Amino acid sequence: EPEPVATVQTLGSEDDQRGLLGLVLLPDSRLVASWTRSSDNRLVAGVVFPAAEAQLIWEGPVSADRANGGGLALSAESEVLIGIGDLLADPNLAEDETVPNRKILALGPNGLPDQLPKILSTGWNNPFAIAVAPDGTPWVADNSAGDNPERIGRADRPASEAAALSTDGLTIAPSGLVALGSDRFGLCGYVSKQVEELKVREGRAERTGRVLADTCWTSVAALPDGRIVTATLDEIRVAVSAT
């Protein structure tokens, strides 16, 4: 039976996209999480282990029912990357550098809650699935909003440069992204419920049509031996090697 290593007070339900949103392990073995704080609905990030209680490193915006983002990754510079969705607000806020909406942000892992994040890129819809390749390049798979396309692109470049994930009209709903090499990724989809292989060709990531794991809802990771770990709503599964 799994035992919790930390507990945070979140607000969320089956009908929205709030709750515990992201986890990332720092080089010094501290664990950083992002969640929607129950007291005021704000999206926050903080060190949750081995601290006795959560130590916030960023106090973010008030969350929305959907399109909060909140996925985390560790950059090559050991910064905490976090994607923030449109928060169901004016899409023009993507160009407003004073708000986090529709941006990929870099947080200092030792920062205070009022730290000013560095903006890596803008224009995303709901950039939840983030991964950093072995060469240090950050990538993000962006969920759709309304008529906007699902897409994948470099997280340090504008969303307008990203490539569409699907040309066949299928909905994937990217929920997790794992780097399997500098030019190869595994993409978990909340709607597709599987892990698909992506390969980077001429700077753009594309689906290859290969399925690496046939059960994945909310997250995907890779073990040192190459096996893929996937998560559903109530299970953690270890799949075969993705090589």
Image: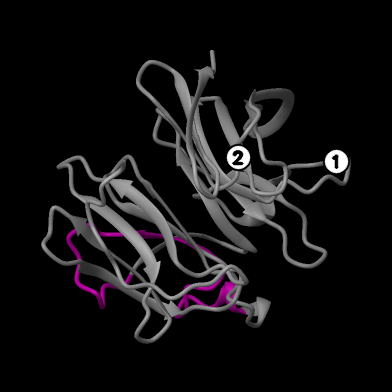
Q: Toward the viewer: 159 or 223?
A: 223
Q: Toward the viewer: 149 or 44?
A: 44
Residue 99: percent from the left, percent from the top? 47, 79
Specify which label sits upstream in the sequence, 1 or 2.
1
Q: Residue at x 52, y 17 (%)?
A: 240
Q: Is residue 227 left or right of residue 4?
A: right
Q: Residue furthest bottom?
A: 40
Mark 2: few/some/many CA within 10 Å (<14, 14-19, 20+):
many
Q: Which residues make up the magenta segment?
A: 93-116
Q: Secondary structure at mark 1?
A: loop
Question: Can you tell which of label 1 and label 2 is closer to the viewer?
Answer: 2
Q: Is residue 215 above or below residue 91?
A: above
Contact? badges 1 and 2 (CB < 8 Å) = no
Mark 1: few/some/many CA within 10 Å (<14, 14-19, 20+):
few
| Distance between mark 1 and mark 2 Cα atoms | 18 Å
Residue on which the image places disc 1: 167
